[in-house]
Image (cartoon, rainbow, N blue to C red):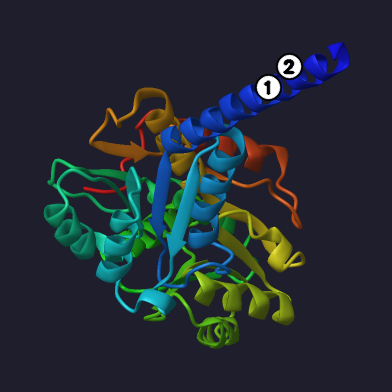
Amino acid sequence: MKKALVLLFSFSLFIAVSGCSKQSQESDTKSRIKIGIMLSDAGLGDQSFSDAGFAGLEKARDEMGVSFDYKEIADTKTYEKGLEELVKQGNDLVIGLGFSMQEAVNKIAKKYPKTSFLLIDSESDLTNVHSVTFKEEEGSYLIGAIAGMKTSSNVVGFVGGLDVPLIRKFEKGFVEGVKAVNPDARILSRFAGSFGDDKLGGQIAAEMIQQQADYIYPAAGFTGVGVLNEAQKSGVYSFGVDSDQFYLAEKAVITSMLKRVDVAIYNVVKEMVEAGKLSEKQMKLGIKESGIDIAPIRVITLSPEEKKQLDVFRENLSEGKVQLLP
């Protein structure tokens, strides 16, 4: 009899603990911050912009326990549809990754004024849309300075994706960086009209190489991957963009312009988790704010004088002593 009572008590205790545990798990699930992201044109696997944004959310999930979902244009056909699906899923924050989503974000944000949105690479006047933009021209200036210092042919190249103001910022910084150290260098510049065509990127790079370009900087997403591959194939040098792309062409990529989309998104999600809302309407990140930098320099070696000059450029950019844009 005594043994039966003990077993009955133990079973009752197990049920009570299990119930509390289940309630706790359900409560935790309900309180979790949910994030939805509409990825840029090229989508996952672009080895650049979209992958960087996705990595920021993965880190937030692993370290803060948030949940997230993503949409790609290949599945939703339009940005508007993808963004609206994310809203209807009940996400606390919906992210539009890329300047090309501004119109769609504005339209959906007006339709759902109680939902918070984050627009990357562009700005909106709507009260429920926050934005993160970057000073891409600063990192591109450092890339241009390296190209100007090290070119042997005195010809360097820039390959853009779409000819839009954002990519012109990359070009402007690169050109000014080259001129700062080598005013006599010839700078070739082309826009591919696409962020997702690596074959076209390779073709443009090959044409520049035929014109003696020995350092080529692409700001063109997956199109730029074709530039890196062609540079390696032809024995010239190139630069990565957005993330460290050294591993894509280890004999050609000497450094990359780091646009810390991953860090920006992670920090935004962190604020959502800790404060329940975003404090800043418009965030602009450059070298000073640790949103822009360059990856370690590999493949080639800078002289002590060149390293010192590059450090001075970085410091001047951080302090606002170099004005690249109006």
Q: Which amino acid does label 2 sit on?
A: Phe
User: Which quadrant is the N terminus positioned in?
Assistant: top right
Question: Compared with residue 283, is residue 122 higher up or lower down, i.e. above or below?
Answer: below
Residue nearer the viewer, 76 or 209: 76
Q: Residue drawn 54% across and 67% down?
A: 44
Label 2 crowd bin: few (<14), some (14–19), many (20+), radius 10 Å: few
Which residue bears the numbered disc 1?
Answer: 12
Q: Horizontal placement of 296 versus 215: left or right?
A: right
Question: Compared with residue 90, is residue 207 higher up or lower down, i.e. above or below?
Answer: below
Q: What element carries label 1?
A: helix
Q: What element carries label 2?
A: helix
Q: Horizontal placement of 188 versus 225: left or right?
A: left
Picture quadrant where residue 269 is located: top left
The reply to whether residue 253 is in sight is yes
Gap between marks 2 and 1 measured at Cα: 5 Å
Q: Where is residue 46 in the image (x, y as percent from the top left)?
A: 55, 69
Residue nearer the viewer, 100 or 169: 100
Which numbered dot is residue 9?
2
Q: Which amino acid does label 1 sit on?
A: Ser
Q: Residue drawn 76% across and 64% down?
A: 250
Which numbered dot is residue 234?
none
Label 1 crowd bin: few (<14), some (14–19), many (20+), radius 10 Å: few
Q: Where is residue 28 in the image (x, y as percent from the top left)?
A: 50, 32
The reply to whether residue 183 is in sight is no
